[in-house]
Amino acid sequence: MAHTIFIDGKDGTTGLRIFDRLSARPDVTVITLDEARRKDPDARRGCIHAADIAILCLPDAAARESVELARGSNTRILDTSTAHRTADGWAYGFPELSAKHRDNVVNGRFVAVPGCHASGFIALIAPLTACGLIPCDAQLSCFSLTGYSGGGKKMIAQYEANDRDAALDSPRQYGLTQMHKHLPEMQHVCALAHKPIFAPVVADFYSGMEVTVPLFRSQLRCGEHPLQEIADALRKHYADSPVVRVLTGDDVTALNGFVASNALSGRDGMELMVLGNDERIQLTARFDNLGKGSSGAALQCLNLMLGANETEGLNL
């Protein structure tokens, strides 16, 4: 029997991508609301209560409202907003982080999909704090380069307008107050005592993301060969993952000295790289901000919640 799914916020960038992919699947039936009723609380409540799982593709305030609308039902909630990523009682939807994370996604009623920038940072740092290579009191920094689709429909329209501002021709740093909405989960999930300095940059390409964490050897608890120790720790951690892959030395050599942020555009996997040398190390995660950074991560979590193949419908 097909599972019933309601996408609350189907018309946004993430919602549309999820809807398009689920519509082709025989194991799910997608409930939809017409344009006139998509913001009607009573109509949304009815759809949420009728669904096995409701996927929230909404701004934070609306996502919190949907959780309230779900009261009195047995509907499971998969939230793609920022609203519940560090909230008590919510599973953090990055199943590769640990057996406990995976079990929480499989069995939890409430699951929060990670933020795009946060996904790259956490994929790199959480395994290293967990194994002790990076101390939890480390003061880290991170920069991230993303395609403009991460800004949603309004930013997409700005970049694709014929008469657009010339400033859009150049990469633009933002989050200038160090209050970016992904910082709480970056700190919390990695068990860090301090929020990292985070410098996100948006550039003139549609989708793709590259998150980098630079490290000095002095920041690590390591032996004589920290570059190899980090690579080995990450490979061991993700050895069984069908989604996250740690690049080998030959893979890095094949890059010819450049890491293109849009290389995984349209795909749902993630590549991790350990670059630099034993004194100055550069950890980089590359993925699609709309894939493993958004709709792909949501579908991966949904598959686990449904008891389906984890990679069903993913483009790896």
Image (spheres, grey):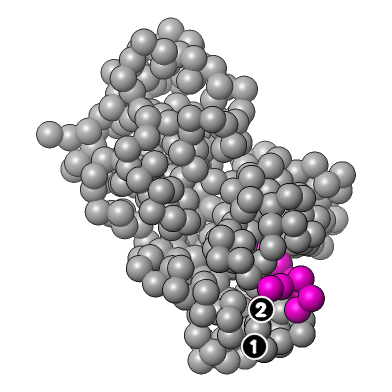
Tag 1 and tag 2, C-beta contact below 8 Å = yes
Q: Residue at x 31, y 57 (%)?
A: 311
> Is 130 on the left-hand or right-hand side of 140?
left
Mark 1 lies on residue: 225
Check residue 133 in the rendering and tell me which mark sits there, or answer none. none
Check residue 222 in the rendering and tell me which mark sits there, or answer none. 2
Within-10-Å neighbours for mark 2: few <14, some 14–19, many 20+: some
The answer for how far apart the CA atoms under marks 1 and 2 are is 7 Å
Q: Nearer the viewer, residue 49 or 122?
A: 122
Type of amino acid at the residue the image marks with label 1: His
User: Could you tell me if residue 90 is visible in this image?
Assistant: yes
Could you say where residue 120 lies in the image, as x and y percent from the top left?
59, 60
Could you say where residue 26 lies in the image, as x and y percent from the top left?
18, 43
Asked which secondary structure carries label 2, the reply is loop
Q: Nearer the viewer, residue 17 or 97?
A: 97
In this picture, which residue range is highlighted in magenta? Answer: 211-222
Quadrant hosting residue 121: bottom right
Quadrant (top left, top right, bottom left, bottom right) of the C terminus: bottom left
Could you say where residue 152 lies in the image, as x and y percent from the top left?
62, 42
> Is 172 on the left-hand or right-hand side of 185?
right
23 versus 200 height, above or below: above
30 versus 260 height, above or below: above
Type of amino acid at the residue the image marks with label 2: Cys
> Is 123 on the left-hand or right-hand side of 18?
right
Q: Residue at x 32, y 42 (%)?
A: 106
Quadrant hosting residue 147: bottom right
